[in-house]
Image: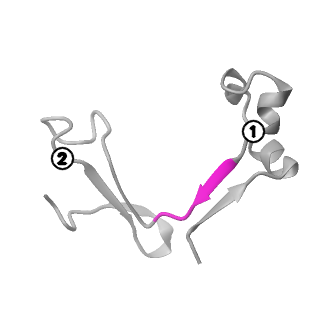
Amino acid sequence: MWPFGLLQRDSEVRRLWKDAFDAYFPTAADRANAAFVEVDIERMELWIRGVTPEPFGLLPTKLERGEGGAWRSSDRNAA
């Protein structure tokens, strides 16, 4: 089973909808085609100013889920 799901039923979209999304889906017709993708992630690499070491953009900040589901810094597979 893949670790993601597509949430597109009206009840799901209404439950997850935030007013800020209206800027991207301004009309009722736009919103009728909106969907959310739910993913289950165990590890991620990202770039965040103030967190990612300098020189920014050269190497990512690596996070992985620890026991209990909390995120922690990871140096696994460091470049």
Real-space CA distance between mark 1 and mark 2, rounded to the nearest whole angstrom: 34 Å
Q: Position of residue 73 (x, y in %)?
A: 29, 59
Instruction: Give the vertical position of 6 relative to 55 (above or below).
Output: below
Q: Residues within 10 Å of mark 2 (few under 14, many from 20)?
A: some
Amino acid type of disc 2? Leu
| Horizontal side of residue 42 vs 40, given as left or right | left
Report the residue at 73% width, 40% height from top. 34
Residue 78 lies, in percent from the top left, at 16, 61
* Secondary structure of residue under mark 2: loop
Please state, as top left, top right, bottom left or bottom right, where the C terminus lies in the image.
bottom left
Q: Secondary structure at mark 1?
A: loop
Residue situated in front as seen by the camera: 42 or 50? 42
- Residue at 71% from the left image edge and 46% from the top image edge: 35
Return the residue nearer the eye: 69 or 33: 33
Q: Amino acid at mark 1?
A: Trp
> Magenta region: which residues?
36-41
Tell me which corner region of the image, top left, top right, bottom left or bottom right, holds residue 53: top left
Lateral position of residue 59 relative to residue 10, left or right: left
According to the picture, the residue beneath numbered tag 2 turns out to be 59
Locate residue 73 relative to residue 2 in the image: left or right. left
- Is residue 17 located in the magenta-colored stretch of the structure? no
Badge number at residue 17: 1
Q: In the picture shown, does residue 33 fall above or below 22?
A: below
